[in-house]
Image (spheres, rainbow, N blue to C red):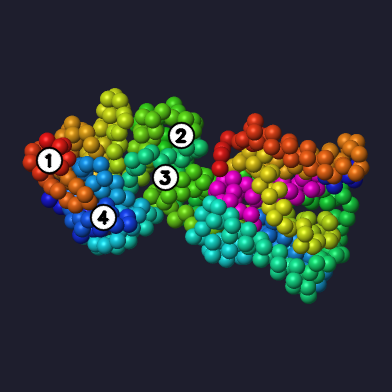
Amino acid sequence: MEYIFHIFILIFIYGILAIAQNLVMGSTGLLTLGGAAFYGIGAYTAAILATKFGVNIFASLALAPILAGIIACVVGVSFARFRDDYFMLATLGFLMIFHTVVRNWEELTGGAYGIAGISKPELFNFTFQTPASFLLLALAIFLLTLGISYRISRSSFGRVLNAIREDEDALKIFGYKTSSYKLLAFTLGASLSACAGVLFASYITFIDSNFFTINESLLLWSMIILGGIGRNRGAVVGAFILIIVPEFLRFVGFPTEFAGLLRQFIYGSLLVLLMLFRPNGILGKYKL
Amino acid sequence: MKYILETKSLTKSFGGVHAVDHLSINIPQGIITGLVGPNGSGKTTLVNVLSGFSGEDEGSIVFSGVDRKKILPWENQAYGITRTFQQIRLFDQMSVLDNILVVLTERSPLAALFERHGAYHLKIAEDILKRIDLHEKKSHHAGDLSYGQRKLLEMGRVLAMNSNIILLDEPFAGLFPEMVKKIEGIILELKKEGKTIVLVEHNMAIIRNLCDHLIVMDAGKLLAEGHPEKILAEKSVLEAYLGE
């Protein structure tokens, strides 16, 4: 049962990340590879505050999104002139800078050794120690994130983001300074990703820089493209499938010497087939 | 005649080509001004510069007596300008209704996030869709509309902007006669409301029917300006534009 709880905790954490990625990439059309960096900023904020200053994880859940939001604002303003693939390369550069900083700033981040002994969240003398209790916490934050994202997508703000994705230059003609909309979407996405990072750090209780590489950003891309670009439920379905399928393949009786490779092969093939026969994703209506 | 829009020695070049070449024209207020000229004469470039879509290299633009340089596209709304495009540019993967609503929304991100006038804007958008006969298609994706309906939706967005100066870049191109009549009707209604309209068009029958003032461009320069009947009878215009 604990294994099932573990899988669902991961689904909720990645669900939050996929929703954040969808806000930035699916709704607004900003091709960002920086998702893993903001996820990492959240995780490292929680880890540093908990291990060095004894700060409760719930406080980190408030502080990390603010810090990630401030950093996203600075990054977003700096990258405002870039579009499409140039923006993607710029965010990749940001991710590499983040990775280099956390890997080399040993006094603060533990460098290659990472940070261990991150505490579990505590609320009114109750510690979310067991997988079941942590699952409830992850579910609550996931639902809150989903609610925020749903509110955004139903608002006029969400409609403008979609119009930016469709034709930013044409939208400007109607009096929109689109850079401020994109900056706010990027900042909100970063803050939500940081929430997922706080949860992850507290759940695993150990983090190092290898958790926040470009592979993680690409996994988020896969989740929203698979589930369906520009739709919250698509992001959630994508996260569910891409967490469940690799776990499911563990139980297929492959020979041990090939098991890892075969799982990766089947996993990759499934993604290719889905894109061939359903390029808009499972629940998608839009194309980038 | 009162002029709402003037250009003074306006120039826009691409490489060594002067698409708009030291052009000085006057657009009268509250009437329809036709902008004609052979292909490549700089009409669309002029519309792009006037709407801030691309910046001018030299010269200036005067709006209601105020000299403006380097208009930025998002300043259009504040200056009361809107435009359509020669190649239709709708938000294709958004609904027909959303294509209108996005024009009505508050421009500040935070105001849009916590919008308080949603119901009011929805009513305006629905009324506009009824006016352009697209209400039944309001839930369809704009990209799924026929060519003529897409042209109508562009006009719907112009109505939603409610701007004083409207730049229409070939709104009749490729349309069948019934749709031409519909769009002519909308343009005449806008004129009745006191809007200033600049109409880029090749069809001389439409120009004669709609326009009160005509500007003829050739190779980025002003060839003639005045009343359509008078201008279209000028020998230089016939030679340059009509090849007669």
Residue of label 1 = B239
Answer few, some or many: residues within 10 Å of disc 4's Cα (few below 14, many 20 plus, some between 14 and 19): some
> In the rendered image, is residue B113 in sight?
no
Residue at 75 percent across and 71 percent down: it is A104
Residue of label 3 = B103
Mark 1 belongs to which subunit?
B
Closer to the chain start, of discs 4 and 2, is 4
Answer few, some or many: residues within 10 Å of disc 3's Cα (few below 14, many 20 plus, some between 14 and 19): many
Pointer 4 with pointer 2, Cβ within 8 A:
no
What span is in magenta? Answer: A8-34
Quadrant containing the C terminus of chain B is top left
Is A52 left or right of B5, judged from the image as shown? Answer: right
Q: Secondary structure at mark 2?
A: helix
Mark 4 belongs to which subunit?
B
Q: Secondary structure at mark 3?
A: helix
Q: Secondary structure at mark 1?
A: helix
Quadrant for residue A229, please give it: top right
